[in-house]
Amino acid sequence: MPELPEVELLKRGLTKYIVGLAIAGVDVRTPKIVSGDPLRVIGGRVVGIRRFGKMLSLDLSNGHSIAVHLKMTGRLIYRGKKQPKKIEVDPNLLELPSKHTHVIFSFRNGDKLYYNDLRKFGWIMVIPTSEVKTLPFVSKLGPEPLRDLDVRGFHEILMKYSRPVKTLLMDQERISGVGNIYANEALFCAGVAPHRKSNTLDKASIRKLYHCILKVLRNGMKYGGSSTDAFRDVLGQRGGYQEHHLVYDREGQSCARRGCAGIVQKVKMGGRGTYFCHNCQK
DNA sequence: CTATCTGTTCTGAC
DNA sequence: TGTCAGAACAGATA
């Protein structure tokens, strides 16, 4: 669920609400979610939030960091003094902690940060700040669009593999941050069929796909993230990008492109829902 | 009730 | 090394 745009929005929200706060306590309700010693965070002040692909690192003044991966259904929800009066929150997030709350960070000023996760795939790791970059998960991440990937680099990656281009886009060790929703949308935007082997794309298509990836990621952020299901921002509010999906979750509906009579197809690729228009994507 | 679906990543098999 | 199925888990939907 949370892909680059959603995690980036979360990063901005956390920066706004918890940077500067000192941690007074941690309540670990589901131990398997947390690794490292949670007590190390106590007394630390949040000095910054970093994002690595879809992972976040909450960096503390005491030399430790809280690395968080939300996987499919994780949520980080802030409740406290800075939260706006009027927010539109899910009914099941009105009462926190809830039965899906696994970790609670309490700040000295009384504010709280809740880690909720319906499916419990996500994780939290307490480690020295200097080790965040060397985590296997982080050090293996490929370049990130919008930051350290240009058309040339993108071209190079596509040429190197003969896999279906969609699974390549979602491979975090090749390109980081793109997940299923944005891969589907970017391929539609570029008119490229998801099952095309990446090294068979021509230069023009590659260029187009590159710009489409940036475009859909930026759009995702512009509309507050994609909340077809699990994603909520740091205040617990839904995003709006799902209303702008052109193929994802639109099986059987008519193609969004003007003048195209195609119907959005759904197939399975690499075990994931793959949506495309046979007419527009070659 | 059963079967199948779900946005991520890791492991183990080939 | 590259690729893929299955697992981790809980709930929604058909």
Image: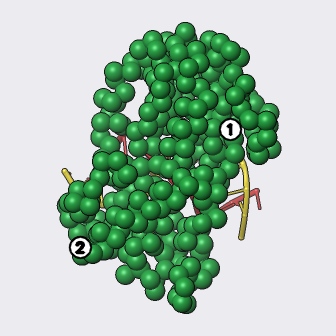
Chain colours: A green, B red, C yellow
Residue placed under numbered mark 2 in the picture: A203
Q: Say whether residue A241 is left or right of residue A166.
A: right
Residue A258, compared with residue A10, is above or below; it is: below
Residue A121 can be seen, yes or no: no
Residue placed under numbered mark 1 in the picture: A235
Q: Say whether residue A262 is left or right of residue A139.
A: right
Tell me which label, 1 or 2, sits earlier in the chain. 2
Query: Picture quarter containing residue A27?
Result: top right
Whole-percent x and y of residue A164? 33, 67
Question: Helix, strand, or loop for circle 2?
Answer: helix
Label 1 chain ID: A
Nearest to the observer: residue A152 or residue A131: A152
Nearest to the observer: residue A196 or residue B14: A196
Question: Helix, strand, or loop for circle 1?
Answer: loop
What amino acid type should be assigned to the residue bearing mark 1? Leu
Residue drawn at x 45%, y 73% is A188
Nearest to the observer: residue A134 or residue A242: A242
Residue drawn at x 41%, y 43% is A53
Crowd band around label 1 with a 10 angstrom C-alpha radius: few (<14), some (14–19), many (20+):
many
